[in-house]
Structure formats: structure tokens, C-alpha cells
Amino acid sequence: MIKTILLKNRPEGKPTTSNFELVKEDIELTISEGELLLETAYVSVDPYLRGRMSDAKSYIPSFELNKPIQSGVIAKVIASKNENFETGDFVLGMLPWKTKQVATGEGLMKIDGSKAPLSAYLGILGMTGLTAYLGLNQIGKPVAGETLVVSGAAGAVGSVVGQIGKILGLTVIGIAGTDEKIDLLKTKFGFDAGINYNTSKDIRADIAKAAPNGVDIYFDNVGGPISDAVLFNINRFARMIICGAISVYNAKELPKSISVQPFLIKNSALMQGFIVSNYEDKFTEAMNQLSGWLDEGKLTYTETIVEGFDNIPTAFINLFEGKNKGKMIVKI
Ligand SMILES: NC(=O)c1ccc[n+]([C@@H]2O[C@H](COP(=O)([O-])OP(=O)(O)OC[C@H]3O[C@@H](n4cnc5c(N)ncnc54)[C@H](OP(=O)(O)O)[C@@H]3O)[C@@H](O)[C@H]2O)c1
């Protein structure tokens, strides 16, 4: 039996399981010349998928209603009539949420499970690791001795940004949603300080206390009031890397934010959004550096692994509840 998850209707506000439909089909898949048969092993759930579930125009097309949702998937080749792939290979690609499927091989990359656990290719050695490395270096242009603040710090991107910051000689402060996550930032990922935004009475003051020399680089994963509080603490020539805005992805109305212009003018500061694919020409260099640091033990990572194909929608929804530490992945 083959299972598929479709987008049944577009979420309004926070997604719920009623936005998705699980379809079961009793069919036998066969492959033609040039094709391969894939069995899904791991599925990545990511906050950006929320944007694709709406019909607003963006940098990537919306998902169509009653069609399978797609994300980063690791699959095992279980039959192949394509000379580039053998039975038993594992591949990574943007694939539909299906337990089994036929593919042409186009857009699929073979991955080596002996170099790193397969799931790492969805996180630290995949899209979120590249986002952390390239956003911080290309826009943040870090200089040893500077102070970096990271929001969404205990997540897939944030936890890697902070560690790279430490490797590059920065003072690193993380903002996250629970005391357990703050503890993880300091004990596992080497952050210098952490702020729990859910218990802080005054985030602006807590950032000032944790960063007595001011903030030179802000890696923003969340947007909203947390990012407003950082603005009050930026230094002259600060760089703000706008990677994500999860705090407003489910907003039904335009969020009210403070005016950033006076902060940028007064501090000659830079605020720049980006999409990791802007830096596709630097993926190989970034990947070599990330895997090198991983091999040397300078980088580490955490995953939250949810088991079972049927639980993909819940794992996705739980990103908005902060239920993950590090990369949220579904193991099939
Ligand atoms: N620009 C790009 O190319 C690119 C690429 C990848 C990811 N991103 C963006 O980067 C951000 C992080 O992605 P990720 O994959 O690493 O996800 P993630 O951080 O692993 O997971 C999402 C986290 O966001 C936090 N969160 C949820 N609601 C929040 C709210 N209202 N306010 C503050 N924090 C909230 C939760 O942690 P807490 O417990 O701390 O709240 C949750 O664990 C996302 O915004 C994503 O869209 C951008």
C-alpha cells in the first residue's frame, strides 16, 4: 500500500491536521527505462512550507490543493532502470510526501550514509546547515571579537549559526523559548549566554545585559517583537541577517512592527533578507567547510526525530509550538 499526504485546504492562521489529507492506494508501482523506484526513509519538515501552503505570491510557487506536499526527502532506491543509480543507494531530493514513488533521477543527489548519518543531510549537511553558514558569512561578514545575537537559536538553523559564530571568535547570545533550550545552547552548542523570550520580563534589557558591548550581528530567524528588541541594542555598522520570520508566518493580519529606518540610519546599519538558493554557487565550498568542522568535532547537532509517515503534518505543526530542538525530521 502506498500512502500520500495532500494539501486539503489552505491554513488560516496556525496550520491544523485538518489542512492535510492522508490517501492510501493499493497499487503496484512499476518502472520504465531511465526510472527508479524509491522508498521514503526521512522527510524534512520546515517552517518555509507554511508559506507554500498559502496562495500568496512568493519566491517559490504555492502548493496546489489536493496535490501532494513536497519537501526535502531522503529515499532508498529499491529498483532502478537508470544507469546513474543502483538498488540500495540513498538519494536526497525535493520529493512529494509519499511512502513510495517512481522518479526519473532528475534533481536527485546520491548521499553517503557511511560519512554521516543519513538524516544529517536534511540538517547540518543540508539546507539548514547551508543557510546558517552562508547567511552568517555572506551577509554578517563576521569579525572575531564581535557580538552575535541569534533568534530561534535552538532550532536547526540557529544552533548551527551560534556554533559557527564561536568557531569564528564571536561572543554569541541565543534567544529561544524554553529554559531547557537555553541550557542546551550553553552546554552543547557553546553559546556564551541565552535568553528565554517566554520568561523574560524585558527582552530589550536582557539583550543589553548579555551584550554589554552592543550587537554587531543579528541572525534573525523569528521576526516580530524579539527582533524589535534587538534593534534597540545594535552597534554602528551592525549587520542584520533576515533569514526567517516564523513569529509572523501564521499572522492573519499585517503585523504591527516598529519603524526600522531610524535605527538603520542612526547606526549606518544593514538589514538584508536572503534565500539560501541565492548562494547556490557557494554550496560546495560551504558543504566542505561544514563537513570538515563536523569531522574535526568543532560542530555538533541535535535532531528531533518523529516516527511514522502519518505523523508528518503533526511534526510540521509542532515547529510553530517550539516542540523541536535542532532539526525536526520524520523517520518513515
Ligand atoms: N532564508 C532561507 O533561505 C531559510 C532557510 C531555512 C530556514 N529559514 C527560516 O529560518 C527560520 C528557522 O528555520 P529552522 O528550519 O531552523 O526551524 P527551527 O528553528 O528548527 O524550528 C522553528 C522554531 O521556531 C521557534 N518559534 C516558533 N514560533 C515562534 C514564535 N512565535 N516566536 C519565536 N520563535 C518561534 C520555535 O523555537 P522556540 O522554542 O525557541 O520558540 C521552533 O522550534 C525559519 O523562520 C525558517 O523559515 C530560512
Image: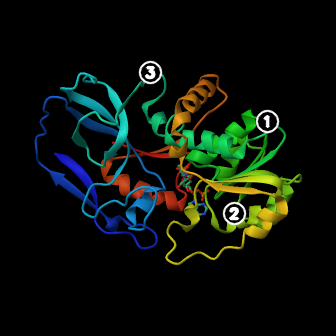
Q: CA distance from mark 1 to mark 3?
A: 31 Å
Q: Are marks 1 and 3 in contact (CB under 8 Å)?
A: no
In this rendering, position of residue 180 left or right of residue 216: left
Residue 260: % across, % down: 72, 68
The C terminus appears in which quarter of the rendering?
top left
In this view, the mark in front (1 or 3): 1
Badge 2 amino acid:
Ser
Residue 258 horizontal/vertical position (percent):
71, 73
Q: Which image quarter is the N terminus in?
A: top left
Mark closer to the observer (3, 2): 2
| Nearer-N-terminus badge (1/3) | 3
**Separation (CA) of disc 3 from disc 2:** 40 Å
Q: Secondary structure at mark 1?
A: loop
> Which mark, residue 227?
2
Amino acid carrying label 3: it is Ser
Pointer 3 residue:
114
Residue designated by label 1: 169
User: Element under label 2?
Assistant: helix
Q: Are marks 2 and 1 in contact (CB under 8 Å)?
A: no
Residue 300 horizontal/vertical position (percent): 61, 33
Name the residue at 36% across, 39% down.
Answer: 93
Query: What residue appears at the point 81 percent right and 53 percent down from the top-left corner?
Result: 237
Is label 1's Cβ within 8 Å of ligand 1? no
Q: Quadrant of residue 62?
A: bottom left
How many neighbours does mark 1 have within 10 angstroms: few (below 14), some (14-19), or many (20 or more)?
A: some
The amino acid at mark 1 is Gly
Q: Residue at x 63, y 77 (%)?
A: 256
